[in-house]
Amino acid sequence: MTTGAPGSSATDLLAAAFVACALPAAEWTHEAHLRVGLWHRLRMPAETSLDTLRDRIRRYNESLGNENTDTDGYHETITRFYVILIDRFVAAADVTGDIDELADDLIARLGFRGLPLDY
């Protein structure tokens, strides 16, 4: 687990806004997805974080008035892909430091939007 007071980091605040469906749509970027995914994975096992993220992303999308369909909104394959990569990243990383620095490292390594297409 990362150090620092709970809820004090930018990643904690971002995740809290996401969970509360209070994050402005413009702030739900690819990098925000990765930060929120990491935040969840640090607090629960990979499979549990996938289930939780699945529910929370769908709920967040709906809170914005968006639908979750086969062509828009939540995407199972991409979410599963990134949860697996985040889990591998966490397994290899020193997760005792600052969560924002850890998230920055994750984004530097896995932040390329076309990454799923490389697989």
Image (cartoon, rainbow, N blue to C red):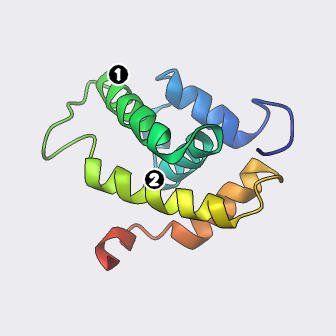
- Say if 13 sits above or below 32 in the image: above
Say which amino acid is labelled 2.
Val
Residue 47: give x, y in percent of width and height: 45, 43
Residue 17: give x, y in percent of width and height: 57, 27
Callout in the foreground (1, 2): 2
Say which amino acid is labelled 1.
Ser
Q: Secondary structure at mark 2?
A: helix
Q: Residues within 10 Å of mark 2 (few under 14, many from 20)?
A: many
Residues at marks 1 and 2 touching, judged by CB atoms closer than 8 Å: no
- Say if 1 sits above or below 66 in the image: below
Question: Looking at the figure, which quarter contains the N terminus?
Answer: top right
Residue 89: give x, y in percent of width and height: 60, 64
Q: Is residue 80 left or right of residue 6?
A: left
Quarter holding residue 62:
top left
Q: CA distance from mark 1 to mark 2?
A: 23 Å
Question: Looking at the figure, which quarter contains the C terminus?
Answer: bottom left
Q: Secondary structure at mark 1?
A: helix
The residue to which callout 1 is attached is 63
Q: Is residue 57 left or right of residue 27?
A: left
Residue drawn at 21 percent across, 34 percent down: 68
Q: Count up the numbered dots.
A: 2
Residue drawn at 51 percent across, 30 percent down: 18
Q: Nearer the viewer, residue 47 or 16?
A: 47
The residue to which callout 2 is attached is 83
- Say if 24 sits above or below 106 in the image: above
Residue 61: give x, y in percent of width and height: 32, 31
